[in-house]
Every structure is written in C-alpha cells, then in structure tokens.
Image (tube, rainbow, N blue to C red):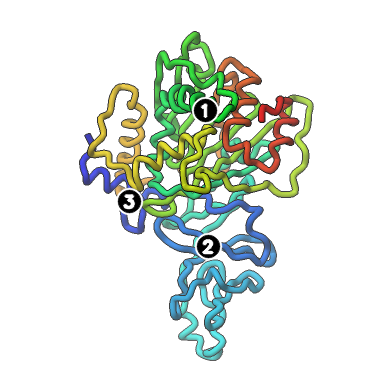
Amino acid sequence: MMTAAQQEALTRVGPGTPMGTLLRRYWLPVAASSELAAGGVKAVRLLGEDFALFRAATGEPALLDARCPHRGASLVHGLVEGASLRCAYHGWRFAPDGTCVELPALAADDSVRARACTRGHPVGELGGLVFAYLGPAPAPLLPRYDVFVWPGLRDIGRAEIPCNWLQIMENSVDPVHLEWLHGRHLASVRAAHGLAPPTRYGRHHEEIGFERFAHGIVKRRVLSGGTRADDDWSVGHPLVFPVMVRVGAQRQHRFQIRVPMDDTHTLHFWYSLYRPRDGEVAPPQDAIPVYDVPFRDAAGAPLLDFVDGGDIMAWTSQGPIADRTREMLVDTDRGVVLLRRLLIEQMERVQAGEDPLGTVRDPASNETIELPQERAKYGDDDRFLAESVAMSHVRYSPIRREILALLGLPDLG
C-alpha cells in the first residue's frame, strides 16, 4: 500500500516538487502547430504554471511566463511584433528569451529595462506538435521518436481531462482492462444503444509481462488462443517515459501523450500516424489537423460507447487525484508497481544531478528513434483496424474518411 508521503511525491507537479522537478527535465507538447498561426498567442498551462505561447512573424514559436513583470497583466493578450511579444497593458515588449527590449514610458532608462526581464523557455516543433522545455540548461535534444518523423497521414485529437496525470499513465501498464472495459463493458454499452459491439478486444489475457528499456517500459501479453511467438508478446509495445504510451497495429501508429497541466488537470493528445502500403504515397497535408474529443454528453454524463470514453470515465471516476493509500493491488498490477518504482528512481536520479531515463543528448542517436511496436496485433486483422477507427476517438477526426481510404478499410460507422 502506498503511503501518503509517496502519494504526494508522485502526483504533485508544481515548481519545486520532486515530480515537478523530474517532469521539467523532459520536452512536453503544449499545442498543435496548426493552431498557432504567425502572430498568434495562446494560453498554456503546464506543470502548475501559466505561459504565453506565441509565434513570431517569421514563424518561430516562443514561450514566456504569462505574467508581465510590471503589473502582472497576462501576456496572453499581448501583441506579436516581429520576434517579440508586447504586453497589452503598458506596452512593455519582450524577446523570446525573456529580455525586455522596450519600455515605452521609460525609453531612455536602460538600467530599468535591463531589470525588467521575464522568463523565456526553449520551444521546439516536431511532427506537427509544439514542445516546451522548462528545466535547467543545457536542454536535452527533443527526441525524434519514429511516429513523429516517419512519412504518412497524421491527425491530432485532444481533450482536457479533469484528473491527475498519473492515474492516466498507470492505465498504460494495466493491460487486463482491455478485455473488460473495452471488451465486455463496451459491448454492453453499444448493444444498449443499438450499435455494433467490438469483436477483438474481449480476448482473455493468459499472460502479461513488463520490462524496462532505454526509453521506458515494454509491455507484453499472450491472449487466449495465442502464444509467446505472437507479436503481442515477442515485440510488445512501449510506455515511453514519462508521459507517453505507443499503441497501434500494422500501418496505424499512435502516441497517447498525457501532459500535466497542474495537479488535477491533464492535456491529453492522441497523436496518430497512418502509413500507406509499400509503393503507395500518403496524400499531402498542408497542416496536420487538430480536433477536440468529447467525453461527456450535454448533461455531463460520460460518453461510454467508444474506447477512449470508457478510459476517461475510469480515470476521472477515481477522483481529481486517486487515493492510492486505499487501493488493493493484485498480481495483474505488476506494471503499475513497476511504473511507480521507476518514477521514484528517476526523481532520485535528478535530485542527485543526473539525467533521467530517456534523455537524449547525442545528435547521432537522434535521427530517428525507433520504438518496439507489435505489427500483427490481434492476428494482423483488418477488422480490428476498422473497429479501432469506428470505436475510438478517431470517429471524431475531420479526416476519418481519408484515413479509412488510405488504410483500405470499410467504414463501420
């Protein structure tokens, strides 16, 4: 059973907390590139702090603390001028590194301007996402994981989920919930709505396994009727430490990214890549679309007739921060225990002045970081892929029909 002190250490993400210090050592996505036009400004809440994300007239993104150091007005309402952001209240203007480059009312007083700085933070773009780094210099490299850099058709779903990030990540090392939540429960809900049930999620887990690797934890399973020779066990798929899980099959690859906004809110991205068959080319994309994934109906009840809606219900019904001092873990929770131990270990590494797991600093190793991922999931079945489109967040994608056409799948509605 977890102690109250361990619970606090693992869940609190604000400045100066052990977990907040660890998470600040990683690049975290804060927006889709397509939602930040040149000259645009967007509010960002990340790890318990507020920021102003803007894109310079020349196209480069930048991130500043939201609070203007003058009187505290939000820079989110400022004006982009060239590569700088001007506060709407009194016109103080800041460069991407936080330097104050102009005080209109005190134009001649350079000593005041030199002290009127704010904090700027490293920002990078990769695969249609804008990433921010809030940790100490020198920043590590932004990892070029395969799904971010391979060619193909992409879309990005998102939702702001009102619970702590950790109970979402723990779901990623809980494989048994597939056969119950996404198998039996989803089938029952869809039947009550007159909808087709899933046919592939309900297979029983005969064996599960977890092991560490250079970028997190590899998860393995043997399903009823299968063996360890199947991709589900022999290859598995990874939890990419600390806030991502990679899932998918065949030519459908996805990162689920759980970005802690604060202790009780998580920005969830479903980042998907769809790859054409050999010899074919994916249709061009001028911009990668981003779309909101609803998880409650107009009355506030959870939407349970799709896979991700069931997940979100399970996460949020544990409360804003799950009380792990009251839980009863069993053998199938081995992955959850491993993740918690890994988080504690990496917090201790950072406190000792070391880089945490998965840090990338060598450019030669960062061309494309290929991750383990089963290809023949559920027996390499197109029916599973078609159901995964119809019964997941992808049903809300603005390019759903293009995805189905690229994969050569029927529309199951």
Viewed as shown, does residue 188 lie left or right of 346? right
Quadrant where the N terminus sits is top left
Q: Amino acid at mark 3?
A: Arg
Horizontal and vertical percent for residue 73? 47, 75
In the depicted view, which residue is nearer to us: 93 or 401?
401
| Disc 2 target residue | 43
Horizontal and vertical percent for residue 308? 51, 36
Decide: few, some or many residues near mark 2? Use Cα within 10 Å; few <14, some 14-19, many ≥20. some
Residue 26 shows up from this direction: no
Callouts 3 and 2 close, C-beta under 8 Å: no
| Disc 1 target residue | 192
Mark-to-mark CA distance, 3 and 1? 39 Å
Callouts 1 and 2 close, C-beta under 8 Å: no
Q: In the rendered structure, which disc, 3 or 2, sits on the residue that comes first in sequence?
A: 3
Decide: few, some or many residues near mark 1? Use Cα within 10 Å; few <14, some 14-19, many ≥20. few
Secondary structure under the numbered disc 1 in the rendered image: helix
Q: Amino acid at mark 1?
A: Ala
Secondary structure under the numbered disc 3 in the rendered image: loop
Quarter of the image for residue 381 reads top right
Q: Is residue 324 above or below residue 108?
A: above
Quarter of the image for residue 104 reads bottom right
Quadrant where the C terminus sits is top right
| Disc 3 target residue | 12
Mark-to-mark CA distance, 3 and 2? 21 Å
Q: Amino acid at mark 2?
A: Ala
Horizontal and vertical percent for residue 257? 50, 42
